[in-house]
Image: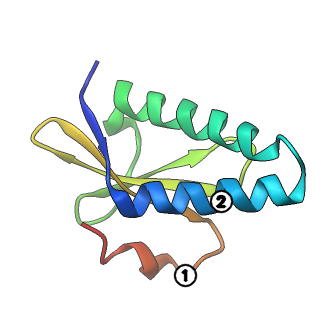
Amino acid sequence: MRPYLVRPAAAADIARAYAWYERERDGLGEEFLTEVRAAMQAVVEAPTACAVLHRQTRRALVRRFPYGLFFRLMDDVVVFVACFHTRRRPESWKGRR
């Protein structure tokens, strides 16, 4: 399995979305985390299956939830830089490293 890293900003994005979904319905945040983990696993297994959106940043969609995981390949390590709602301004993640 390819190594991966979740940047603090991406972890914070995921935590905020988790909290929002838990407020909406008990257990929904856990369902969100399950789908995020599945998307991360798919990315780690085949990162080049996701198209490049901007420079070296790629996006994988999270099943069942309107979120995208933004990541880069750096020296064969998958680096997750953001997890944003798909309706959020697309430029928002571009400044993430």
Up the image or down, 92 lies above or below 42; here it is below
Q: Say what amino acid the circle numbered 2 marks.
A: Ala
Quarter of the image with the N terminus in it: top left
Which mark's residue is nearer the viewer, 2 or 1? Answer: 2
Type of residue at label 1? Answer: Arg
Residue 11 position within the rendered picture, expressed as x and y whole percent measured from the top left:
45, 54
Q: CA distance from mark 2 to mark 1?
A: 16 Å
Q: Quadrant of residue 27?
A: top right
Q: Name the residue carrying label 2.
A: 17
Q: Is residue 34 left or right of residue 82?
A: right
80, 60: nearer the viewer: 80
Residue at numbered disc 1: 89
Which structural element holds mark 1?
loop
Q: Residue furthest top?
A: 1
Residue in the picture at 67% in, 53% down: 18
Give the percent coordinates (x, y) of residue 90: 49, 76
Residue 43 in the image: state x and y as whole percent. 41, 35
Q: Which residue occupies 70% across, 43% down?
A: 32
- Farthest right residue? 25
Q: Is residue 91 above or below residue 3?
A: below
Q: Nearer the viewer, residue 29 or 64?
A: 29
